[in-house]
Amino acid sequence: MNNDIKQRVLKLAMQVADEQGVKIFDIELLGKGKLLLRVIIDKEGGVTLDDCERFSRSLEAVLDIEDPVPGSYTLEISSPGLDRPLKGIKDFKRNTGKLARIVTVEKIENQNFFIGRILEVGSDFVRLLINDREIDIPLEKISKARLEVEFK
């Protein structure tokens, strides 16, 4: 997404989010020709279908007036989902105690793929519990991370 367009959409979306008590998790502009503008919202306790619908109507009205995206596009509002990506230290901290899948850019203890429970988040590491063993993964070495869906 053109950075200028993304910044304009983000600014408008954040205004709507503040009014409705949700946070912007991510913004994507996908496709060629007719584009898909995807805005992913979140809030403490999770996002409902009503939250997405209300946010969509409000943001659509603002985007129609401000017109930050050239050409035609489809607006899609969604939540991050159960297997949400973890995009930074705040996400890891908020999800302490949950099961996560982490891929690293280089091997740590002879592997670069980990599934474990987030025990602790420091300023530069995430500590996972994997099979009764704790492992520290430096944040700078993480290439991808997401929550794992747990069935109880």
Image: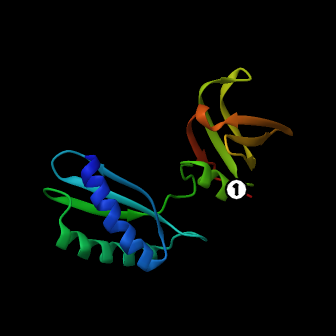
Q: Position of residue 127 (x, y in %)?
A: 75, 42
In the displayed structure image, the side of residue 138 where residue 53 appears, left or right: left
Which residue: 56% across, 69% down?
A: 46
Which residue: 52% across, 58% down?
A: 81
Is residue 51 or residue 120 the one in the foreground? 120
Which residue: 59% across, 34% down?
A: 140
How many discs mark residues in the rendered view?
1
Q: Is residue 79 visible?
A: yes
> Would you name the residue on which mark 1 appears?
151
Which residue: 69% across, 35% down?
A: 137
Q: Is residue 50 visible?
A: no
What colour scheme has been applied to the protein in the rendered image? rainbow
Specify the farthest residue to the top.
Answer: 110
Q: Secondary structure at mark 1?
A: loop
In the displayed structure image, the side of residue 140 where residue 125 appears, left or right: right
As shown in the figure, which amino acid type bears the numbered disc 1? Phe
Q: Quadrant of the C terminus?
A: bottom right
Location of residue 55 by image quarter: bottom left
Answer above or below: position of 25 versus 100.
Answer: below
Specify the farthest residue to the right.
Answer: 132
Location of residue 107 by image quarter: top right
Answer above or below: position of 36 versus 54.
Answer: above
In the displayed structure image, the side of residue 101 where residue 8 appears, left or right: left
Is residue 41 or residue 131 the one in the foreground? 41
